[in-house]
Image: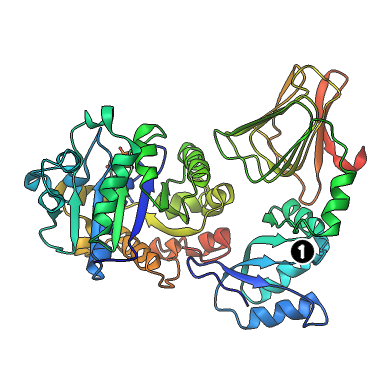
């Protein structure tokens, strides 16, 4: 088990090289744990939302609260993020084939990619599409001439189609902004909490900004 | 001579959240643990660390004279009358703001590093020059905030700036926690705050009237620490800073009767 020296948060590293599966590894680590707050390092194991929920309930049985996740699997990060957990994507080394393949598949023009949380007062603008791997906190603002995709929580302000493109969309794993803008339309963010585990998308439909689950489109 | 001096910036963005009170109490607590500690008042505009420590009438020279080479560092340092491991380096007059540069702060801190285990920098509110100068001289930071939307927003802004300046680690202290208000959801919860700020929580400080009494008396609470809830919190923060694994206290126990309800809300004992 890897432990950080300062602070209260311990890191549990789950891996499958020495265990038949991650659950057994997790239980083993939890047994030897003397802390209540942990970060789970999932390495490159792919975990779905259901897996993550199961993982949380196992940790619960050991009175252990999961603070955050980190992983090299984008699937796992999406799952944990969408359940509202702080999640850090660890980028694979450039020598890794997977990343290269992914890079080829991304076909955004003039698109910008930003990794990391945007905090209050920070501002990001893109002349094309904007892809953010991280949260957009209250008080932060992002804008793009094209689409905005946030692999994290949108809690600040987002403006897609900033030069007037009303086809532009804003997607996020957790879409609860202070304000949303698409082209010239302005909408305030919805008040009620979003359903966990479902990414949402905002777009203009009959002259109004509407928000719907991402799968439905 | 101290070799591994820790230089810690105590900052918040928003004013009046409790930076100076934390600096004074943490200074006393660390000194109590036998660590030689310097507190540096970097709030040149509205200095009051000397007041809180009850040292105002002992100041002869300040950081300003040290920088202008009109006196030696040890002439400007004011030793605390009851806690000899603690020294204050007072802020110069507000006009220092006109010429002080980040390098000047670094020079001062480098001098302090030669003889102290800890250097705590009491940062001014805001994110302007005063903050930037103080940040330039720091290695790590403690961000102080209150369970209020505006304080959290400003703290978030400051954390962004600390991150871009490679200040590490950055830890959080949540001050003026009122268990009853939290239990009634009239105040942001601990989770609401840590969820946005995503920082390790170094500790909580309970709202405590004795803080105000001690401020007026010029005697930090931790100096006498009778039965003050806040004093206990400050002492624990100092111990955690030293790497001790002190569990976070549960404010539900501080406000009996609300225990069960609060615990349910909290889910974990992260105090
Ligand atoms: N835990 C607490 N309980 C009650 N009162 C508190 C607490 N912490 C701070 N205060 C009060 O809040 C006020 C502001 O505290 P302090 O001067 O430490 O804040 P600051 O962040 O240094 O302010 P500034 O930004 O002006 O420098 C003081 O009157 C202090 O007594
Ligand atoms: Mg102050």
- Pick the front one: B90 or B154: B90
What residue is shown at x 82% (from left), y 29% (from top)? A210
What residue is shown at x 40% (from left), y 60% (from top)? B255
The residue identified by callout 1 is A52
Where residue B121 sits: x, y (%)?
Answer: 31, 49
Q: Is residue A33 above or below residue B264?
A: below
Q: Is residue A24 above or below residue B124?
A: below
Left of A167 or right of it: where is A30?
A: left
Secondary element type, mark 1: helix
Left of A147 or right of it: where is B219?
A: left
What residue is shown at x 46% (from left), y 55% (from top)? B171
- Pick the front one: B48 or B18: B48
Q: Is residue B238 above or below residue A17?
A: above
Badge 1, how many Cα within 10 Å: few under 14, some, many 20+?
A: some
Ligand 1's quadrant is: top left
**Does the rendering let one see residue B255?**
yes
**Does the rendering let one see residue B209?**
no
Please give the chain letter of the residue carrying mark 1.
A
Beta carbon at label 1 within 8 Å of ligand 1: no
């Amino acid at each position: 088990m890897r432990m950080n020296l300062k602070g209260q948060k311990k890191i549990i590293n789950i891996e499958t090289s020495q265990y038949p599966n991650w659950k057994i590894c997790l239980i083993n680590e939890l047994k030897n744990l003397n802390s209540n707050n942990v970060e789970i390092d999932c390495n490159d194991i792919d975990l779905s939302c259901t897996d993550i929920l199961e993982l949380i309930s196992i940790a619960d049985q050991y009175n252990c609260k999961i603070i955050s996740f980190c992983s090299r699997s984008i699937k796992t990060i999406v799952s944990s993020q969408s359940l509202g957990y702080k999640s850090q994507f660890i980028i694979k080394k450039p020598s890794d084939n997977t990343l290269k393949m992914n890079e080829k598949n991304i076909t955004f023009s003039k698109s910008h990619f930003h990794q990391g949380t945007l905090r209050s007062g920070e501002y990001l603008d893109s002349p094309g599409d904007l892809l953010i791997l991280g949260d957009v906190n209250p008080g932060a603002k992002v804008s793009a001439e094209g689409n905005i995709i946030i692999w994290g929580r949108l809690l600040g302000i987002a403006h897609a189609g900033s030069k007037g493109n009303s086809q532009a969309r804003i997607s996020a794993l957790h879409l609860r902004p202070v304000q949303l803008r698409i082209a010239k339309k302005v909408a305030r963010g919805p008040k009620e909490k979003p359903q966990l585990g479902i990414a949402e998308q905002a777009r203009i439909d009959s002259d109004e900004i509407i928000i719907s689950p991402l799968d439905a489109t | 001579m101290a070799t591994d001096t820790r230089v810690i910036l105590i900052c918040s963005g928003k004013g009046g959240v409790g930076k100076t009170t934390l600096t004074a109490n943490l200074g006393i607590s660390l000194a109590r643990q036998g660590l030689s500690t310097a507190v540096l008042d970097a709030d040149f505009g509205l200095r009051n660390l000397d007041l809180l420590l009850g040292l105002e009438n002992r100041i002869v020279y300040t950081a300003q004279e040290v920088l202008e080479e009109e006196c030696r560092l040890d002439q400007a340092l004011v030793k605390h009358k009851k806690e000899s491991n603690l020294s204050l380096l007072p802020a110069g007059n507000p006009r220092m703001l006109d010429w002080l540069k980040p390098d000047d702060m670094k020079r001062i801190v480098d001098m302090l590093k030669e003889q102290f285990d800890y250097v705590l920098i009491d940062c001014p509110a805001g994110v302007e020059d005063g903050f930037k100068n103080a940040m330039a001289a720091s290695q790590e930071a403690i961000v102080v905030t209150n369970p209020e939307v505006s304080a959290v927003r400003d703290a978030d802004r400051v954390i962004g700036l600390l991150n871009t300046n490679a200040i590490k680690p950055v830890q959080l202290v949540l001050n003026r926690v009122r268990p009853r208000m939290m239990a009634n959801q009239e105040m942001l919860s601990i989770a609401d705050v840590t969820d946005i700020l995503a920082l390790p929580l170094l500790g909580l400080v309970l709202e405590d009237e004795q803080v105000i009494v001690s401020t007026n008396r010029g005697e930090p609470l931790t100096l006498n620490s009778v039965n003050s809830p806040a004093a206990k919190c400050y002492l624990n923060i100092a111990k955690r800073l030293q790497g001790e694994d002190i569990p976070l206290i549960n404010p539900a126990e501080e406000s009996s009767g609300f225990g069960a309800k609060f615990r349910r809300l909290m889910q974990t004992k992260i105090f």
